[in-house]
Image: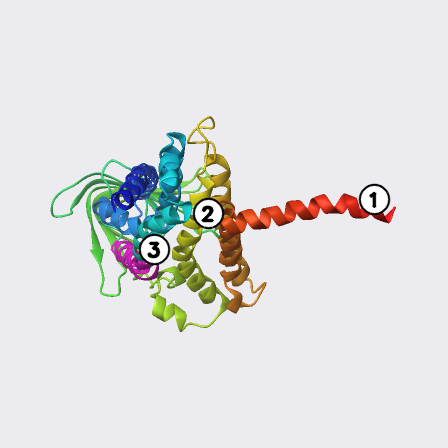
């Protein structure tokens, strides 16, 4: 029981360290991307934390398998390098026992990853889509940031305001109304006003209402232009309520996805199931691959192990794309990849088992007999 706890604790500690580092890196990258989108006015800055939190389940689905794989490699590699595994083997603790203990940690990871992959991540993505749709529909007044040039929601104008008070009244407004794409004259309106406000209609259309200003109308192809002073001026900055986005398959619940026909739905469903299964296969591969001797050091097998891991997940990504394109039948899914990984794991694990030694002996004996048969034939 002491060895059981020790093995679990060492793997868990190593996985936690790797998970923390990977999460920090990936969250930082996503934070920068979300912050850049908010800075561009795609959604209000108040949504940054919420959107980042909703990204976490999807990130965790991809990071948890890698953190466990590297955690096993690091923990077991250190034990081999410091002769702890030699001591375990000398007192009768086999590698197969170590594998079974490690599988206990794996089952815990599989349960969390399955919950994230099948239920929580799709729900989080759906909530993210709903928030972005709502933010986009409310874009206009909330997205206008004082002191910055911004494009209007319909892309037909560039706005600049000097200040905005608590009642959302705008002061010192500059607007450049851009010509339509099919307008060859290039006629442009430049509007400057002392104050303004955004008015939203019931159908979602938004109007920018300006008070006390001047409009300059002209074309870059002509020296003629008009100057019009006005007391009130209206312009449209958003056409109508944003239509609901096409719901992505990755945001659908797993039950709904299972009942949806089509190759893309089948590929997405197989992908969600494949990730938890891959954790078990990679654990069976990681335990024998972490064998190193003292001279090699604990990182000796790390590079080939990472290549194997990337190859496994690369094949899963390729298989998902192939399923979407109907390259092979959907009922095959990604099972053949897991089967291949399982065969590799069995071969690696049996290397140190009696059956593996017998098979190796048979192969060597067969190779020795081959030259004799050739000589006899001569």
Instruction: Determine the CA span between mark 2 and mark 1.
Output: 41 Å
Label 2 or label 3, whichever lies nearer to me, is: 2
Q: Dot 1 corresponds to which residue?
A: 375
Q: Which of the marked residues, 3 or 1, is nearer the chain's N terminus?
A: 3
Q: Dot 2 corresponds to which residue?
A: 285
Q: Residue at x 73, y 46 (%)?
A: 369
Does residue 116 sit above or below 332 in this rendering? above
Q: Which residues are magenta?
A: 114-138
Q: Position of residue 198 (x, y in %)?
A: 21, 52
Whether residue 290 is visible: yes
Q: Position of residue 19 (x, y in %)?
A: 31, 41
Q: Position of residue 134 (x, y in %)?
A: 26, 58
Q: Secondary structure at mark 2?
A: helix
Q: Secondary structure at mark 3?
A: helix
Q: Secondary structure at mark 1?
A: helix
Instruction: Determine the CA span between mark 3 and mark 1.
Output: 56 Å
Which residue is more in the foreground, 63 or 285? 285
Label 3 or label 1, whichever lies nearer to me, is: 1
Was residue 222 drawn as part of the magenta stretch in this picture? no
Does residue 148 sit above or below 284 in this rendering? above
Question: Mainly helix, strand or loop, the magenta region?
Answer: helix
Whether residue 177 is visible: no
- The label shown at residue 324 is none
Q: Dot 3 corresponds to which residue?
A: 110
Q: Residue at x 47, y 41 (%)?
A: 289
């Amino acid at each position: 029981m002491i060895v059981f706890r020790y093995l679990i604790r060492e793997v868990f500690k190593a996985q936690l360290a790797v998970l923390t580092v990977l999460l920090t890196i990936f969250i930082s990258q996503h934070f920068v991307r979300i912050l850049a989108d908010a800075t561009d006015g795609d959604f209000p800055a108040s949504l940054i934390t919420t959107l980042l939190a909703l990204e976490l389940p999807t990130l965790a689905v991809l990071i948890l398998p890698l953190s466990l794989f590297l955690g096993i490699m690091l923990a077991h590699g250190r034990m081999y390098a410091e002769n702890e595994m030699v001591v375990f083997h000398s007192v009768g603790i086999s590698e197969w026992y170590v594998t079974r203990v490690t599988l206990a940690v794996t089952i815990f990871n599989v349960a969390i990853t399955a919950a994230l992959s099948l239920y929580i991540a799709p729900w989080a993505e759906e909530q993210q889509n709903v928030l972005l749709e709502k933010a986009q529909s409310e874009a206009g007044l909330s997205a206008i940031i004082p002191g910055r040039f911004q494009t209007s929601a319909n892309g037909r104008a560039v706005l600049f305001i000097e200040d905005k008070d608590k009642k959302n009244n705008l002061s010192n407004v500059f607007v450049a109304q851009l010509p339509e794409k099919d307008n060859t004259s290039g006629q442009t309106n430049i509007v400057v006003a002392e104050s303004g406000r955004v008015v939203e209609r019931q159908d979602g259309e938004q109007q920018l209402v300006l008070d006390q200003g001047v409009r300059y109308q002209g074309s870059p192809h002509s020296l003629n232009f008009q100057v019009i002073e006005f007391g009130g001026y209206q312009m449209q900055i958003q056409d109508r309520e944003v239509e609901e986005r096409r719901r992505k398959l990755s945001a659908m619940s797993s039950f709904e996805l299972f009942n949806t026909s089509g190759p893309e739905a089948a590929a997405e469903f197989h992908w969600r199931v494949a990730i938890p299964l891959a954790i078990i296969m990679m654990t069976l591969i990681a335990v024998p691959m972490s064998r190193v001797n003292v001279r090699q050091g604990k990182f000796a097998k790390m590079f080939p192990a990472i290549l194997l891991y990337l190859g496994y997940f690369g094949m899963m990504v390729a298989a998902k794309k192939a399923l979407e394109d109907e390259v092979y039948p959907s009922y095959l899914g990604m099972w053949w990849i897991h089967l291949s990984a399982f065969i590799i794991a069995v071969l690696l694990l049996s290397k140190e088992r009696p059956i593996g030694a017998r098979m190796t002996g048979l192969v060597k004996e067969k190779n020795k007999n081959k030259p004799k048969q050739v000589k006899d034939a001569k």
